[in-house]
Amino acid sequence: MPEYLITFNDEWVPEHTPEQIRAKSVASHAVMAEMLAEGVLIFSNGALDRSTAVCSVESVDGKPVFTDGPYVETKEHLGGFAVVDVPDDEAARYWAGRLAVVLDWPQEVHRFRGPGRAGGAAPR
């Protein structure tokens, strides 16, 4: 089955109180539990921002050069994501819609090109 990335950027999320974040965490974990029960969730993670970055790396003369910064300049940071293995775009949209509703902020859906995991089928 095709694999999809469902994600949001931190910049899309309005300010929340700690209580609101806790409530949204409970609600989104319930959706993740449904994804697990349906066997579609491959991996998810959240709370990613500039503070979670370990390093940046670039190729210099064919060798990787790691630095603690500066990081690529961008206003948007990946806020969280889920990778799902579902039969089609419609199913990926369903799960993204569930997350958008419980979190009340936008989600974006990307279909991975080509085979995913070792032995995985290429998307149609």
Image (cartoon, rainbow, N blue to C red):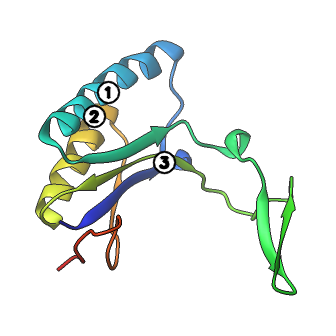
Mark 1 — residue?
A: 29
Taking 53 as reference, is 47 above or below it? above
* Type of the residue with mark 3: Trp
Task: Give the image location of residue 97, x and y in percent.
Answer: 21, 47
Q: Which residue sits at x=43%, y=17%?
A: 22
Of residue 17 and residue 95, the one placed in the foreground of this image is 95
User: Mark 3 falls on what kind of element?
Assistant: helix
Q: Quadrant of residue 124?
A: bottom left
> Viewer-nearest of labels 3 and 1?
1
* Type of the residue with mark 1: His
* Type of the residue with mark 2: Met
User: Mark 2 falls on what kind of element?
Assistant: helix
Of residue 83 and residue 118, the one placed in the foreground of this image is 118
Give the Cα distance between marks 3 and 1: 20 Å
Q: Quadrant of residue 34?
A: top left
Give the Cα distance between marks 3 and 2: 20 Å
> Viewer-nearest of labels 3 and 2?
2
Task: Give the image location of residue 67, x and y in percent.
Answer: 87, 59
Q: Quadrant of residue 25?
A: top left
Marker count (numbered): 3
Q: Residue furthest top?
A: 19
Taking 63 as reference, is 16 above or below it? above
Mark 3 — residue?
A: 12
Which numbered tag is attached to residue 61?
none
Q: Residue furthest front?
A: 119
Instruction: Give the mark, 3 or 1, whose residue is nearer the N terminus.
Output: 3
User: Cβ–Cβ below 8 Å for labels 1 and 2?
Assistant: yes
